[in-house]
Image (spheres, grey):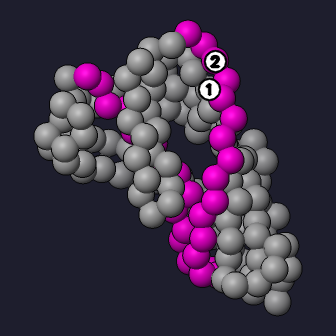
Amino acid sequence: MRCLWSVIAAVVVACTTSASAQVQSVSRMASGEPNTDIRVGVYVNVRPDCTSGPLPSIQLTSPPENGKVTVKKARITATNYKQCLALEVPAFVALYRSRADFVGIDVLTLEVKFPDGKTQVQRISVRVGSGAAGRST
């Protein structure tokens, strides 16, 4: 099994594995200020030879009630990851942005399908500002 799992600002970076088709559920947290982009996911595919493989597909299966989610293409650099001393690979970055007046916790669900058949359902709770869960001001 070959997989890259790192923490970048409390966000999981995931890649493919060579296992047969499977579904994995993951719950995570992210936090940030109202009406700003909050990174909730970074998705790459690093092969054993340190090159990039095909990126996963990402679907928003449960949208947040108090904001929106966007996905952008990016390039990620990493050093000293297993046998990869330095690499730069393409990635998808998922961003959450709340309404300007929302403070609290918003929840969204992403379904990430990797080229090898693995599917990951990610339930992401986003703490916006310092308010109580689900409360808007």
User: Would you say the residues marked 2 and 1 are in contact, meaning their CB atoms lie under 8 Å apart?
Assistant: yes
SS state under label 1 = strand
Instruction: Identify the image quadrant of residue 30.
Output: bottom right
Answer whether residue 100 is visible to the viewer in this image: no
In the rendered image, which quarter contains the N terminus?
top left
Marks 2 and 1, how far apart at CA: 6 Å
Check disc 1 and report the residue beneath it. 119
Q: Residue furthest right?
A: 135
Which span of residues is magenta-colored? 20-48
The answer to whether residue 69 is left or right of residue 83 is right
Residue at 55 percent across and 10 percent down: it is: 20
Looking at the rendered structure, the number of numbered marks drawn on it comes to 2
The residue lying toward the viewer, choosing from 81 and 61, is 81
SS state under label 2 = strand
Check disc 2 and report the residue beneath it. 22
Instruction: Identify the image quadrant of residue 45.
Output: top left
Q: Residue furthest top?
A: 20
Amino acid type, label 2? Gln
The answer to whether residue 30 is left or right of residue 45 is right
> Residue 34, how many percent across, how many down?
64, 81
Query: Relative to 16, does residue 78 appear above or below in the rendering?
Result: below
Amino acid type, label 1? Thr
The answer to whether residue 59 is left or right of residue 4 is right
The answer to whether residue 3 is left or right of residue 85 is right
Instruction: Categorize mark 2 by other alpha carbons within 10 Å: few (<14), some (14-19), many (20+).
Output: few
Query: Relative to 7, does residue 117 appear above or below in the rendering?
Result: above
Residue at 18 percent across and 31 percent down: it is: 83
Instruction: Categorize mark 1 by other alpha carbons within 10 Å: few (<14), some (14-19), many (20+).
Output: many
